[in-house]
Amino acid sequence: MNKELIIRSNSSAIDFALLKDGKLIELHKEENDRNFSVGDIYLAKIRKAVPGLNAAFVNVGYEKDGFLHYHDLGPQISSLQKFVKRVSTGKLKDYSLKNYSFENEIDKDGTISDVLKSNQSILVQIVKEPISTKGPRISSELSLAGRYVVLVPFSNRISVSQKIEDKEEKDRLKRLVKSIRPKGFGVIIRTVAEGKKVADLDKDLQNLMNRWTGMCKKLYKASTPSKVLGELNRANSLLRDLFNESFTSICTDEEALYTQIKDYVTEISPDKESIVKQYQSNVPIFEKFGIERQIKTGFGKTVSMSKGAYLVIEHTEAMHVIDVNSGNRSNKAKNQEETALEVNLISATEVARQLRLRDMGGIIVVDFIDMNKADNRKALYNHLRDEMSDDRAKHKILPPTKFGLIQITRQRVRPEMNIKTREKNPNGNGEIEAPIVVINKINADLQKLIKKGHKKMSITAHPFVAAYLTRGIPSPRSKWFFDHKRWVKILPRDAYTYLEYHFHDHNGEEII
């Protein structure tokens, strides 16, 4: 498995594309005027407490107030509030917490009005970016994420990622962190810490303590609302969370980003410094790596897969619904179950990819093809879990129901990635699918016809599409010849609409 991170920069935004074995699995956009990112910490002001919701609305500088629920205050909110007040007024200049006396923890079943009052200053962290008409979701239980550990102020707890399964390794990491943990801070040990030495963990902890100290210095005489600690830029944040030995290339077309990323990779993994490259070519970087094509074909309502299968993805107010279709697969009784399992496994892989690619959150219902055998349903469930194991968003997958439905809940912390793939119809009003999608459909139809035994075929298409299929070295038609040992005659037809095409047999009879 090879992973590549391709970064495209322009004046208004930076686009990040994560490829796994050449296939696009994540796409992120960081706009230059973006004010709120998950992980940012703000000195904010309580607008009002609402006992009926057991929550408070907080002014963090967004047009809509942030939402702070009682359960997101953290048990040590009283200690945090006293600390912020003393630091803001200059009465406390030791930010280490080693000599700081903690207040009593709040009642876990208490009410918001017992803890917070209107116009009170509070330190909060963004846990969910503004989505649609809602303001950001916030928490006052702060955490600072590093490469190997997460630092949690006003806590004494040490916990280990559940993805580290070896008990001895868990005990080793806990023992190491216990010996270096700063007093007054809890530590969460991340999955990538597995097998690391105490020096690596200590260096990461010191970096986080330096960030904490820098944030506390900003609190003195800070106005409300104001950002006092910003999350890493999206490139370094992705690398911090995802970078491992499987990365083979990190490529960007901007010199400043190249230098920044190279410095960060040198810091976290010096032996991988050489994989960071600056892209220099007249061909746009997303074109060069085939990302534009994958965006056009991956964000539509219909998503094609191998062997003629395809997904139909619908979005409603309450949930996302994904329908699995087998296409023109054989449906004979003797192999119907095997065909269903094969298509379902292919679809499960694509569903896992689509959830990450579009960053779909909330409730997702997938209608797989019905299977009669319990072993096959279990195999599908396990395969989907394996495919989603790399997904950073918290998620839960329920086993298939009697009707072949699998329900998934997936954490939503930022707006869904939604890219318009339809284009203006050059022949009239309305919109059409992107032309590149039609090329994929032609490829899929050609494979179906070859499997059915057709040998001599021709295609009639609009002159623009016909020209695309025959021009270039190698042209799409030449690739077909090398892949299928078939020479397909392509004939332009002026009367056709832009995306119209038909296959014909050797007698000129229309097949598709």
Image (cartoon, rainbow, N blue to C red):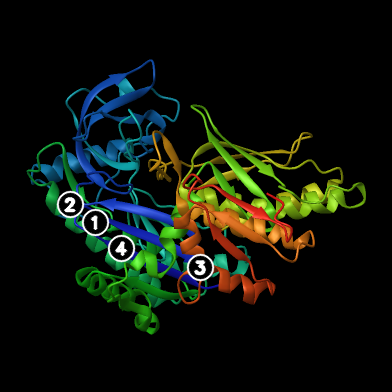
Looking at the image, residue 449 sits to the left or right of residue 91; the answer is right
- For disc 4, the marked residue is 8
The reply, left or right, for residue 395 in relation to residue 401 is left
Q: Point out residue 240 in the picture as x, y percentages from the top left corner.
A: 38, 64
**What label sits on residue 436 in the rendered view?**
none
Residue 367, image x, y percentages: 68, 38
At 40% from the left and 41% from the top, the residue drawn is 427
Return the disc, 3 or 1, that comes first in the chain's sequence.
1
CB atoms at circles 3 and 4 under 8 Å apart?
no
- For the N terminus, the quadrant is bottom right
Give the residue number, with chain letter if any, for mark 1: 212
Measured in 3D between alpha carbons, the distance from the residue under mark 3 to the one under mark 4, in whole angstroms, is 30 Å
Which is nearer the N-term, disc 1 or disc 4?
Answer: 4
Residue type indicated by callout 4: Arg
Q: Residue furthest top?
A: 52
Q: Secondary structure at mark 3?
A: helix
Kindly tell me whether residue 389 is visible in this rendering: yes
Q: Is residue 54 above or below residue 11?
A: above
Give, as a three-letter code, the residue at label 3: Thr
- Depth check: give the residue in front, 129 or 66: 129
Q: Amino acid at mark 1?
A: Trp
Disc on res. 216: 2
* Disc nearer the start of the sequence (2/4): 4
How far apart in space, not on screen, are marks 3 and 1 (Cα)?
A: 61 Å
Residue 182 appearing in the image: no
Please name which of the two marks, 2 or 3, marks the residue nearer to the observer: 3
